[in-house]
Amino acid sequence: MISKSSLVFLVNTSIILINLLLNTSCFYGKSKLVFVISKILIVPLIAFINKPKTINFYVVFLLFSWLGDIALLFRHELFCVVGSLFFLVGHLYYAKFISPHSLKITTFSVILFIPPLSIILFKVIPDIFKAKFIYHLSIFYIAILLRTMLKSTQIYQHSSPFNRNFWFNYIGYFCFIVSDSILLVNEALQKMNGMVNFYVLLFYALSQFLIALSQK
C-alpha cells in the first residue's frame, strides 16, 4: 500500500506536470507560481518518504539536489551551470559514501552502463558542443553522473544483487541521466519550453522517487 508521504509527493508531481501541459509554450507552464512552489517541494517531499533519522550521505545528496532545483528556476545560462554544480557536488558525495572502496566491475554492470553512455556519446555531447562554451562545462557533470551510476550499480550488485533496491537505484539513476540530458541539451540550444520541461520534470521526479525507495 502506498504511504501518505508518497501519495503527497505524487500529487505534487501531478500538479506541476499538469500545469506544464496547460501551456506547453511557456517554460513555467500555465502558472509560474504553481510551477515554482511545486518544484521547490519535490526534494523536501522526497525526504519525508525516506525519513532519514540522521544527517547521512543521502541527506547531503538531497540538500544539494534541492539547491540545484532552486538555481534552475532562474532563466539564465549562469544559473544552469550553478545548478549543475550543486547536483555535481551531491552526486560526488553520494558516490563517495555509497562505495568508499573500489569494487570489481562486473560484465553485468558494463552491460547496464551501455544505454546511458550511448545517450551521452551520441546525443548529449554532439548537441552541447554546438552551443556556447559555458555549456561545455556540463559535460564534466554528466561524466560524474555516469560514474556515480556505475559505482552505485556496483555496490548494490555486490551487497544485494538483483533485488528491488538494486533495480530502483539503477532505473532511478537512468531516469536522472535522461532528465539531465534533455535539460542540458535544450538549455544549450535555447529550446526550453513547457513541453520540454514536462519531460525533464517527469523523469527527474521519477528518478528521485526511485532512488529514495532504494534507500529503504
Image (cartoon, rainbow, N blue to C red):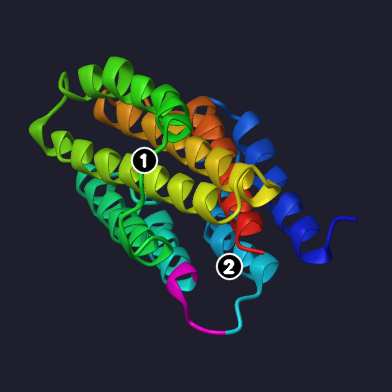
Give coordinates of residue 5: x percent, y percent: 76, 65
Kindly identify the residue that appears in the image at 34 percent across and 44 percent down.
145
Q: Is residue 70 above or below residue 145?
A: below
Residue at x-position 34% and y-position 39%: 146
Distance, label 1 to label 2, CA atoms, is: 34 Å
Residue 44's disc is 2
Which of marks 2 and 1 precedes in the sequence?
2
Q: Amino acid at mark 1?
A: Ile
Q: Residue furthest left?
A: 133
Closer-to-camera residue (128/115) = 115
Q: Residue at x 62, y 42 (%)?
A: 167
Q: Quadrant of residue 120?
A: top left
Q: Nearer the viewer, residue 54 or 163?
A: 163
Foreground tag (1 vs 2): 1
Secondary-structure class at tag 1: loop
Q: Is residue 213 above or below residue 169?
A: below
Find disc 1 in the rendering and name its residue: 105
In the rendered image, which quarter contains the C terminus?
A: bottom right
Q: Secondary structure at mark 2?
A: helix
Query: Where does the image place residue 99, in percent across and percent down from the top left?
Result: 39, 60
In this rendering, is residue 123 above or below 89?
Answer: above
In the image, what residue type sits under mark 2?
A: Pro
> Relative to the observer, which residue lies in front, 180 or 13?
180
* Picture quadrant of residue 170: top right
Q: Residues within 10 Å of mark 2 (few under 14, many from 20)?
A: some
Residue 195 in the figure: left or right of residue 185: right
Task: Please state if 157 lies on the left or on the right of 6 as rendered.
Answer: left
